[in-house]
Image (tube, rainbow, N blue to C red):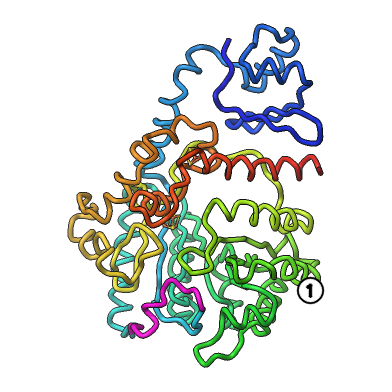
Amino acid sequence: MFLTKNKAFFYLKNNYYILNTENGALIKLDKNSYEHLKNKNIKKLSNEEVNILRKNGFIIDKNEYNNFYFNNRNNYLISKHLKSDSLKIDIAVTNKCNFSCTYCFEKENLNNYINVNEKTKNEFRKNLSDYINNKIKNNNLKKITIVWYGGEPTLEYDFINKINKEYYELGKEKDIEFNNIIISNGYLINDKFISELKKYNTSYIQITLDGEKDMHNHRRKLKSNKGTYNQILNNIEKLISNKIETVIRINIDKENFKQVNNLIDTINKKFSKFVGKYLFIDLSRVFGSEYSYTNYEFKDIKNNFTHKLFKYKFLEPIISNNGVNAFCSAECDNDDLVIDIFGNVYKCWNYVYEKDKAYTTLKEIIDNDFKIISRNKNRLDYVEKASLLTVNEGECLSCEFLRYCKGLCPDQRKRMIEGYEENIYKNDKCKEIVYSYIESNIKEILSY
Ligand code: SF4
Ligand code: SF4
């Protein structure tokens, strides 16, 4: 009889709880049982307590206990290398943008926008089609997802519509589910675009608002300096009235954090009947600006606002998880791609249009009989160097919280290795962040 390593204790409003971080089971404990469990003194528990704990996966047999690390490692490696029956292609369709945001990570590109001619677009379309059709033939695909982003993807919305239509129809013909997601600043959404989104299975559109009117307009303005807040709010209203799921992204740093509470109130008041149905809010940390919070600092900021999102039902609290798997395709050796309109293929979203960060091109993959030439540094930096087998000295694969945080975003791992970001693996700061995230969800579920 062994106590699982996949557990965490919580003390909330004078009550003790134990959470199974593998299956999400949560049990309230009296003080004695808590002490026994904390000290791994299972023998002191009553038979009834042992039975309940066993039923909920807290008490396991020796084999399972000893295989803790190997099971995590195997599941992680399978998800990293498995060629699955779903394919995700992230397309940075342009590097142009109609905004000039104060913190934009593409700042250096502002004077470096690339005009793309029809020939390049047609070539991209043809190569993409060859690639996807090859995967349909060889991987028995059941699902294709395209994520459109940029720059600002709506600057190319005719092109987006054409490709969405192509794969929507192909999906119908071959019985493959096609869906797409659009990451936009929300300024150019018009009725025509909305009707196309409805036709071709857009799962959701993500739009950024960074504060109430003045703050948003200061941070996210047009190139001409004109504010964008009113028009974006009108467009969000159009989208949700047309039953298109919309996620409002709020990028938070030290400049705008005081506004976030009021912004959430305003959105809730204005769109209350759509909240939790078609309208959701996602909070994100601004990285790399002079006002940025560190990951650790952001923990309490995010938890505070998350509480408000729960209250209004922009978010549902959740303590379950979806198992041990890779964080995103950047660390995977699968067929998913992150590409720009020239067909350059990257590992991470953050570096599109930085050609020296690409690891291959669509054309090169096609010419190589649809196989990726794997030994390229830009690729190995994510697949091997940032792998959970090596970062944090492999400790993540023995961590009780692995299923919740997946060992952090691979690009963050890489930045920590290279010293560009605070190393939150040190002193278990990462565990504190995950613990407090789970705790705030439990509090909400118990309505504390
Ligand atoms: S590595 Fe991180 S930033 Fe890059 S695509 Fe994956 S989740 Fe996004
Ligand atoms: S990042 Fe930290 S909390 Fe997450 S799995 Fe690794 S050690 Fe655990």
**Residue range (magenta):** 102-114
Picture quarter containing residue 221? bottom right
Picture quarter containing residue 393? top left
Say left or right for 3 vs 440.
left
Decide: few, some or many residues near mark 1? Use Cα within 10 Å; few <14, some 14-19, many ≥20.
few
Say above or below: 190 vs 27: below
Camera-nearest residue between 414 and 136: 414
Q: Which residue is mark 1?
A: 270
Q: Residue at x 60, y 77 (%)?
A: 194
Percent position of residue 427, x then y: 49, 38
Identified by mark 1, the residue type is Lys
Q: Quadrant of the N terminus?
A: top right
Q: Any magenta on residue 40? A: no
Q: Mainly helix, strand or loop, the magenta region?
A: loop
Say above or below: 65 vs 374: above
Q: Residue at x 47, y 14 (%)?
A: 63
Percent position of residue 447, x then y: 81, 43
Say above or below: 327 vs 368: above
Q: Residue at x 64, y 78 (%)?
A: 215
Camera-nearest residue between 437 and 151: 437
Percent position of residue 112, x then y: 33, 83
